[in-house]
Image: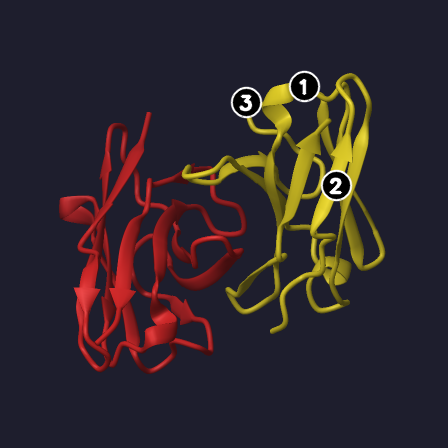
Chain colours: A yellow, B red
């Protein structure tokens, strides 16, 4: 399984919105409803931000939203804040109890 | 609230073995558990998973035949036995709770394979 494709970087100014894409195949993103997004600050463990494409765990601000179209999933961060600066990883269930991650996107708040 | 704590990492020579542990504390119920690794400065890579009673496991192709995941629910602990270690297995290893999404993660344990 090849990694899901994410842009290496994204950026936006405080208060703006930014969208990060994650492209896979019909065997993972396109054929599954189990797409997740994780936030990771330097030296820290990942944190679940979105699961099952659009759902937010308790405690995650509603500024974070997920979507999917075909083989591409997206994470949108609205009203950017300084603390949103981090690495973001998408993940998809790929069948037969396999998971696959994207290569990660470094989000910079300008 | 469940917390996960990994241990067992360290420095090992190529061809050597290590056993990682992931201990759960707090309100524990058996869940699917995952191991994910990350080379410093690089992305997350899925390694292995195990279901709530240990009857179902799976592995990434890169570790299949060398790594074995297991669990002891009486001890609230999941293990990753790593044999025939290679330089490319060097990474921080995280355990996470969940099947298709991991809502609780440990802090990671570092494995360095080097001569």
Q: Is residue B7 placed above or below A65 in the rendered structure?
A: below
Pointer 1 and pointer 3 on the same chain:
yes
What numbered label is drawn on residue A81?
1
Q: Same subunit under labels 1 and 2?
A: yes
The chain carrying label 2 is: A
Q: Earlier in the sequence, mark 3 or mark 2?
A: 2
The reply to whether callout 3 and callout 2 are in contact (CB within 8 Å) is no
Which is more foreground, mark 3 or mark 2? 2
Q: CA distance from mark 3 to mark 2?
A: 26 Å
Nearer the camera: disc 1 or disc 3: 1
Numbered label tally: 3
Kindly identify which residue carries mark 3: A58
- The residues bearing labels 1 and 3 have C-alpha atoms spaced at a distance of 19 Å
Quarter holding residue A66: top right
In this orientation, which residue lies closer to the viewer: B57 or A107? Answer: A107
Q: Residue at x 59, y 22 (%)?
A: A83
- Please, what secondary structure does the residue beneath circle 2 have? strand
Residue that carries the numbered disc 2 in the rendered image: A10
Using a 10 Å C-alpha cutoff, classify the residue at mark 3 as few (fewer than 14 neighbours), some (14 to 19) or many (20 or more): few
Q: Is residue A80 left or right of residue B2?
A: right
Q: Chain of mark 3?
A: A
Mark 3 vs mark 2: tell me if same chain. Answer: yes
Quadrant of the rendered image containing residue A99: bottom right
Q: Earlier in the sequence, mark 1 or mark 2?
A: 2
x 59%, y 66%: residue: A95
Counting residues from the start of the chain, the first of labels 1 and 3 encountered is: 3
SS of the residue under disc 3 = loop
Q: Position of residue B65 (x, y in %)?
A: 33, 82
Q: Position of residue A33 (x, y in %)?
A: 69, 51
């Amino acid at each position: 399984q090849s990694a899901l494709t994410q842009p290496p970087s994204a950026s936006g100014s405080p208060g703006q919105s930014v969208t990060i894409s994650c492209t896979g195949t019909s065997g993972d993103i396109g054929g599954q409803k189990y797409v997740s997004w994780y936030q990771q600050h330097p030296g820290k463990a990942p944190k679940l931000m979105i699961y099952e494409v659009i759902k937010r765990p308790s405690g995650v601000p509603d500024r974070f939203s997920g979507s999917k179209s075909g083989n591409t999933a997206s994470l949108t961060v609205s009203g950017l804040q300084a603390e949103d600066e981090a690495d973001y990883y998408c993940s998809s269930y790929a069948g037969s109890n396999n998971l696959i991650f994207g290569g990660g996107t470094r989000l910079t708040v300008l | 609230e469940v917390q996960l704590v990994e241990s067992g990492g360290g420095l090992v020579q190529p061809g050597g073995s290590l056993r990682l542990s992931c201990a759960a504390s707090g309100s524990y119920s058996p869940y699917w558990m995952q191991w994910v690794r990350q080379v410093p400065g690089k992305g997350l890579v899925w390694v292995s998973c195990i279901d709530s009673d240990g009857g179902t496991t799976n592995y990434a192709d890169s570790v299949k035949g060398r790594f074995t995941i297991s669990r002891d629910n009486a001890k609230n602990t999941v293990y990753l036995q790593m044999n025939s270690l290679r330089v490319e297995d060097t990474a921080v290893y995280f355990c996470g709770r969940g099947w298709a999404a991991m809502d609780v993660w440990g802090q990671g344990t570092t494995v360095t394979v080097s001569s």
